[in-house]
Image: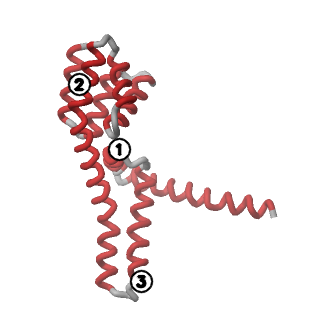
Amino acid sequence: AGAGRAREKAQPRGMRETALGLADEIVKQRGLEETLSRKLDAGGVPLKASEWLILHIGIALLLPLLVLLITNFNLVMTVLAVITGLLGPLVYLTIKAGLRTRAFLAQLPDTLQLVSGSLSAGYSLPQAVDAVVRQGNPPISDELRKALVEARLGAPIEDAMEDVADRMGSKDFAWVVMAIRVQR
């Protein structure tokens, strides 16, 4: 009985790994990995591109099937479900990224004030960014936390902050990073 349970537990893991591997190949072959990863990062969605693809395909297949069964084979509703299943996840991701970017930009003035005050108090730039991470709110604190992690792993803090500007699509923050580079 114990061997049967072990096989049952191993089977789903193999299917999961196979599905993720296949989705990863599709994403890489189609050149979608970088684009999709950027959108997922901008939206704050903690999934890999291959995981998002599996979720998207699942929604695109299951939603029309569910609508078909619930509506007793109503083709008009099923066609609408197909369209929703195909476009819905992309629309969701676009809206989520837009809202997160707007929140980032709204928090930027207060964040720059906090960094400026910390630098005036004698903190180094990484210490000032760490103060924002500890005292700030998402999404800006989350993005600057990623920058700090990159800096702690050896990347220059300016490069890590430039990555934040790229992820969030913020020209204003890119200007801030440029000013930091010039000042340093």
Give the foreground label among 2 and 1.
2
Q: Residue at x 33, y 21 (%)?
A: 128
Label 2 SS:
helix
Q: Earlier in the sequence, mark 1 or mark 3?
A: 1
Asked if 130 appears above or below 169 in the picture, the reply is above
The residue indicated by pointer 1 is 41
Cα separation, mark 2 vs mark 1, equals 25 Å
Cα separation, mark 1 vs mark 3, equals 35 Å
Quadrant for the N terminus, please: bottom right
Q: Residue at x 34, y 14 (%)?
A: 123
Which amino acid, mark 3?
Ile
Quadrant for the C terminus, please: top left
Label 3 SS:
helix
Viewer-closest of 115 and 79: 115
The residue indicated by pointer 3 is 70
The residue indicated by pointer 2 is 113
Cα separation, mark 3 vs mark 2, equals 55 Å
Give the foreground label among 3 and 2.
2
